[in-house]
Image (cartoon, rainbow, N blue to C red):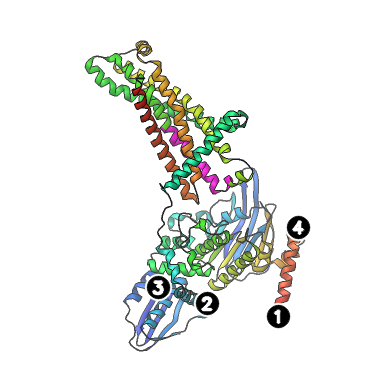
Amino acid sequence: MPVEQQAIISVSGNVVQCQGAWTLSNLKDLERHIERLRWPEDHEVVCDVEGVTAMDTGGALLLQRIDNDLVRRGKAVAVRGLKPEFTELVRLVQAKARLNHASPAQQAGWEKFPLLPSVKIGTDGIIRALAFLGETTVAIGRSLLRPRLIRWRTMLRVVEFDGVRALPITGLLTFLVGVVIAYQGAEQLRKFGTNIFIVDLVGISLLREIAPLIVAILIAGRSGSAYAAEIGTMKVTEELDAVRTLGISPINLLVLPRTFALVLTLPLLTVYADVLGVFGGMLIASGQLNVSFAEFLDRFDEAVAVRHFLIGLAKAPFFAVIIALVGCYQGFQIRGGVDDVGRHTTISVVQSIFLVIVFDAICSVVTSWWDL
Amino acid sequence: MPVTAPAGAPVIEVSHVSTKFGQAVVHKDVSLTIHQGEVFAIAGGNGCGKSTLLREILGLMTPASGTIRLFGVDSRRLDVSNGGAIHRRFGVMFQHGALFSSLTLADNVAVPLREHTNLHPRLIREIVEVKIAMVGLPPDSAGKYPNELSGGMRRRAALARAIVMDPELVFLDEPTAGLDPIIAAGFDDLVLSLKMHLGLTVVMVTHDLDSLWRISTRVAVLGDGRVLGVGTMQELSQSEDPLIREYFHGPRGRAAHEQAMWNQRGRETSFA
């Protein structure tokens, strides 16, 4: 390699000879060389940099470091032959070094861990959540008393995005779950020759538990996360502040339409999911267990009481409230920047699914107490 | 059109570029050459395609037709997959800083060094500290996150990140927009001093008539989808083109011009 493309340092007598391009791409090797170098024994050292053809900030810093090293060893250093175009840079770096000595406090910035301000499960978080819940409850009450206040247009848009457009995926998923349950049940029922009980199995489990749960989990992932991200981004871009200064309550504008829309949509989606799930079970029953569609529906009528359907349906609005409020709440919790949006979106999904399942478990316990 | 002969070799060559957004024509046949060592400003009214041109030069957008060469390389081939060999030679300061919000200021500035070099962490840290000092940020701001910084500080931090690799060329997108006049003037000084110390070529997109007068060596005025004029501010202010006249001789343009003249006279008399 020609001298111009590498950075060279060598010691001869009391002269430290610097040559070549002291630029970023060469500094790694240069730094290693400097560490291994044996400095001259003499008291007076000359640092000859006439051969340095190029120098950037990194190079200037290394030159400065050599100088410091030598001075610390009690030597007198004279730098010779620095090209005029580099003097300004070297002077800047020296000025910086002095500043550095003057204020060791600045190092703090480097040692500071990027302590995530998340997961504050302190009283602080609980109070904020309760405040949000209270504020929303009041707003809901107020707009129920005066339905004119409800933003129907926004609400319908949410119904379209989170309800109508979710039809294919919810339908497909519950259909498949119906198929899976029927398949697994078929194995066992055939052993006992009680094929017809497939209807009870599919009907009750789907209508009462699985269809509402699948729909809720799906909507939590699909819409709850979107609420958190939307509101969070609005916060980051100061749109929320704009809303407030326009004298509009963000809760009225953003939370209520979403909550109402989901409360309306989720039961409808659940009914739709019930139908497709049972249809999936019905297909397998006729294929695997010789239970024809007519027999299946006959049995369905007598085996599956209406209360199973109603219990499943009754849970849906509560799931909707949980999903909408958790999503919106997490959106409002976003401070600062872009990474916060991602984190709170994730939290919103995890929390809402968690709460949905906890609520479902409580419902199961309560309904079994009441023998429903 | 009077064109001053610029000194250095061409760094950016824009030839016959036209751009369309759907039906809307942004540029029709725009040609520019920017030379080494210049402080080249791209000016023009809102929506005249200044920022679009900048994005095209940077290879973030492709023009409908025409070619743009950056250091002699077609900007359509500015590929990041080859390790960004060309990207190391320029730095960009975006209008709102575009600092990574998950990183501290110091880590933000260190990103290019960590990605493109294999330097020892200690040296990276020293380089970053020098750059932070160079752009005039206090040392204790190094550990702060972007959302803890003011607009002006964010702008400076973005500049520090743009120059951390000691590039030959720096792009500034509206460097003084939204800054108070004192900080804006300080930013102009900063750009001038960095240009002097690091031998930078500066390309900036700006509306700021004061900084056009103070720091630009040449200005291109865009409007109506084409280059209305290229030259020093002095030359442009004498232009006959109605759109340029409107731009430079409106009330603000005149005030900035008078201020610039006054500054110059002040300098001359103090030298006398």
Q: CA distance from mark 1 to mark 4?
A: 33 Å
**Which residue lies most toward the bottom here?**
A43
**Which residue lies most toward the left here?**
A191
Q: Quick check: marks 4 and 3 in contact, CB under 8 Å?
A: no
Amino acid, disc 2:
Glu
Kindly identify which chain the residue marked by label 4 belongs to: B
Kindly identify which chain the residue marked by label 3 belongs to: A
Q: Find numbered disc 3 in the image and state the secondary structure of the residue it sits on.
A: loop
Q: From the viewer's perspective, is residue A64 above or below residue A161?
A: below
Q: Predominant secondary structure in magenta?
A: helix
Q: Earlier in the sequence, mark 2 or mark 3?
A: 3
Kindly identify which chain the residue marked by label 2 belongs to: A
Residue name at image x 63 percent, y 64 percent: B184
Q: CA distance from mark 4 to mark 2?
A: 41 Å
Q: From the viewer's perspective, is residue A288 above or below residue B2?
A: above
Q: CA distance from mark 1 to mark 2?
A: 26 Å
Provide the residue span drawn in magenta. A217-240
* In-front residue for pair A341/B253: A341
State which quadrant residue B159 falls in. bottom right
Q: Position of residue A24 (x, y in %)?
A: 43, 68
Label 1 environment density (alpha carbons within 10 Å; few <14, some 14–19, many ≥20):
few
Q: Earlier in the sequence, mark 1 or mark 4?
A: 4
The residue where tag 3 is placed is A6
Q: Is residue A245 left or right of residue A317?
A: right
Q: Find numbered disc 4 in the image and state the secondary structure of the residue it sits on.
A: helix
Q: Position of residue B8 (x, y in %)?
A: 59, 70
Q: Position of residue A198 (x, y in %)?
A: 31, 17
Is residue B174 something one can see in this rendering?
Answer: yes
The residue where tag 1 is placed is B270
Q: Quick check: marks 1 and 3 in contact, CB under 8 Å?
A: no
Q: Nearer the viewer, mark 1 or mark 4?
A: 1
